[in-house]
Amino acid sequence: MESASVKFEALPLLLPETAPVIIPSPRNFENLAFPNVAIELPGVCPLCVHAIEAKYIASYLRPGVTNQSPLWLEVMFACPRFDCQRTFITRYVGSEKQELVNRPEYWKIEETFPFKALERGFEETIQRVSTQFVALYNQAYSAEQHKLALICGAGYRKSLEFLVKDYAKSKNPKDQVAIEKTQLGPCIQNYIVHPKVVDIAKRAVWLGNDETHYVKKWEDKDLADLKALIDLTVHWISMDRLSDEVIADMPDPATVAS
Ligand SMILES: [Zn+2]
C-alpha cells in the first residue's frame, strides 16, 4: 500500500460541527476498506438541474498512485426527485493538506458525470438578429462544459462572427456581400459603433485567426476575453435594437411636424 494511504489510515476521524455526510468505509479496486470519510453533498442534480439532497448509493476510493498524487473518491448518488431518480457519480479530489484528511473541506468536487449541459438563454431581440448565433453559442457552451477547449474557443468565435455579421447586414442591407467577405476584426470596427467593444476587439489576438484550418491553442485568458467581448456585443446590439424600436414607436414630434 502506498504511503499516501498509510497517512490516511493513521489519522482519526474528526467530525465537523456542520452536518456532513459520512461515506462508510469506501473501498478500492482490491475491495480493501478505508476509514469513513466526511464529504459535502453535491447540492444540484446534474441531470434534472434541480436543488436536491443527493442520496448516497456507493463509493470507490483510489489512493494516490504516487506519494504526490491526490486521493480520489468517487461517489455514486441518486436524485430523490420522483420525476428524475437518475444516478450520477461525483469525483472528489483530496487536497494537499493532509491534516484535513478526515474533514469535509479536505475533499473538493472535481467533476460530476453524466451531466446535462446547460443552455444560455438570450432575449428575443438577439434571437431576432441571429438565430445562428444563439445556436452556435450554445454548442460552444456545451463543448466548454465538456472541457473541449479547442472546439469551444473556435465555436464561440464563430458565434460572434454570425452575431456581428447578421447585425451588420440587418443595418446595412446594401452591403450584404461586402460584409460576408470582411473578416471578423474589421467587421467589428466598421459596424459596431461602440468604443469599448472596438477597443476590446483590437486587443483580442485570436480575432486575427480567420483561417478555418488554423489550429489555435486557446488559453483560458483568450476564452475569458472572447466571452467578455461576446457579452458586451450582445448587450450593445440589444440596446441599439431597443432604441431603434422606441424611436420607431415614438417619432420625434419636431420631425413629424416638419
Ligand atoms: Zn435529478
Image: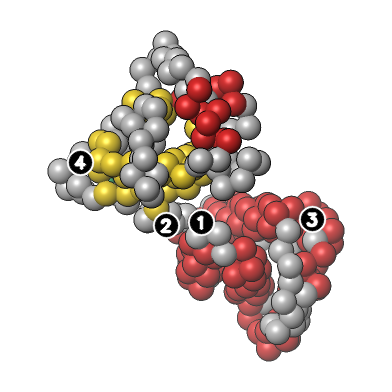
**Marks 1 & 4, CB-CB < 8 Å contact:** no
Residue at far left of view: 82
User: Which residue in the protein does label 3 denote?
Assistant: 200
Q: CA distance from mark 3 to mark 1?
A: 25 Å
User: Which residue in the protein does label 1 denote?
Assistant: 145
10 Å crowding of disc 2: few (<14), some (14-19), many (20+): some
Q: Quadrant of residue 69?
A: top right
User: Which residue in the protein does label 4 denote?
Assistant: 81
Judging depth in this view, the residue of 217 and 241 nearest the camera is: 217
Q: Position of residue 147 (x, y in %)?
A: 55, 59
Sequence order check, earlier mark of 2 and 4: 4
Q: Position of residue 83 (x, y in %)?
A: 17, 47
Q: Is mark 4 within 8 Å of ligand 1?
A: yes
Give the label, 4 or 3, closer to the camera.
Answer: 4
Judging depth in this view, the residue of 238 and 209 nearest the camera is: 209
Q: Residue at x 20, y 41 (%)?
A: 81
Does residue 87 appear left or right of residue 255 in this picture? left
Work out whether 131 lies above or below 54.
below
Q: CA distance from mark 2 to mark 3?
A: 29 Å
Sequence order check, earlier mark of 1 and 4: 4
Q: CA distance from mark 2 to mark 4?
A: 19 Å
Marking on residue 117: 2
Q: Residue at x 51, y 73 (%)?
A: 132
Q: CA distance from mark 4 to mark 3?
A: 45 Å
Q: Quadrant of residue 124?
A: bottom left
Does residue 115 appear left or right of residue 173 in this picture? left
Give the label, 3 or 1, closer to the camera.
Answer: 1
Sequence order check, earlier mark of 1 and 2: 2
Q: CA distance from mark 1 to mark 4?
A: 24 Å
